[in-house]
Amino acid sequence: MASMEELRKIYLLQALTDGMLEKIIPHVRALSFSERELVFEEGNKAENFYMLKKGKILLETKVSDRLIISLGSIKSGYSFGWSALLAGMSHTSHAVCAEPSDVFAIPGEKLRDILEKDPLMGYRVTLFAAKIIKNRLERRTGQLLKVIANHPDMKKLLDSPSEDAE
């Protein structure tokens, strides 16, 4: 089980009161993983929401038998496994430990239930979740634009004069 002090270090939970955290604590399990161990696999049912206490998690997806792409990394204090916050969802990537990691897990169904019963708590968590997801989306959009701009076929298009210029 997690302590109040440990959960306060999780960015998503920083705006919660002691009373709000006390509703979550009984449902949080502490898990430990070794380097290269999978926390969850892409396509599996998303049952738990995760918060990284210590370590580093890589979010990866398998594009082909020969190519795995890293979608990003999770640092201590941040959360992953967002699909568990929506009923019936599956994970959209693998979560693999880049180093030994300590993780807090809470069943998504239980967290959704707690947040639904306490609208202020739900609002505060949703607000922080929106900030986190917005930052990740901006970072991924930047990465995508960089890849597109550096693709050889795109370089030809970007470097060639426009027909409108004539």
Image (cartoon, rainbow, N blue to C red):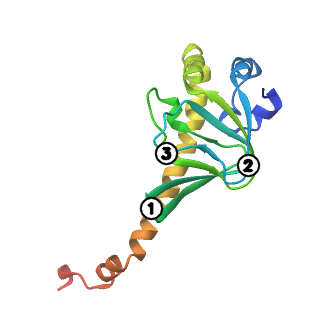
Q: CA distance from mark 3 to mark 1?
A: 14 Å
Give the residue type at disc 2: Ser
Q: Quadrant of the C terminus?
A: bottom left
Residue density around tag 2, few if under 14, some if 14–19, many if 20 or more, within 10 Å: some
Taking the spot 70% from the left edge, 17% from the top edge, the residue there is 23
Q: Which mark is residue 65?
A: 1
Give the residue type at disc 1: Asp
Residue at the farthest front position: 65
**Which of the two labelled residues, at mark 3 and mark 1, occupies the earlier sequence position?**
3
Q: CA distance from mark 2 to mark 3?
A: 19 Å
Q: Position of residue 73 (x, y in %)?
A: 62, 54
Q: Give the answer, above or below, for where 80 lies relative to 21.
A: below
Q: Position of residue 83 (x, y in %)?
A: 50, 36
Mark 2, residue position:
34
Taking the spot 47% from the left edge, 29% from the top edge, the residue there is 86
Mark 3, residue position:
42
**Which of the two labelled residues, at mark 2 and mark 1, occupies the earlier sequence position?**
2
Observer-side mark, 3 or 1, equals 1
User: In this orientation, which residue lies closer to the viewer: 141 or 102?
Assistant: 102
**Which of the two labelled residues, at mark 2 and mark 3, occupies the earlier sequence position?**
2
**Element under label 1?**
loop
Residue at the farthest top position: 117
Give the residue type at disc 3: Glu
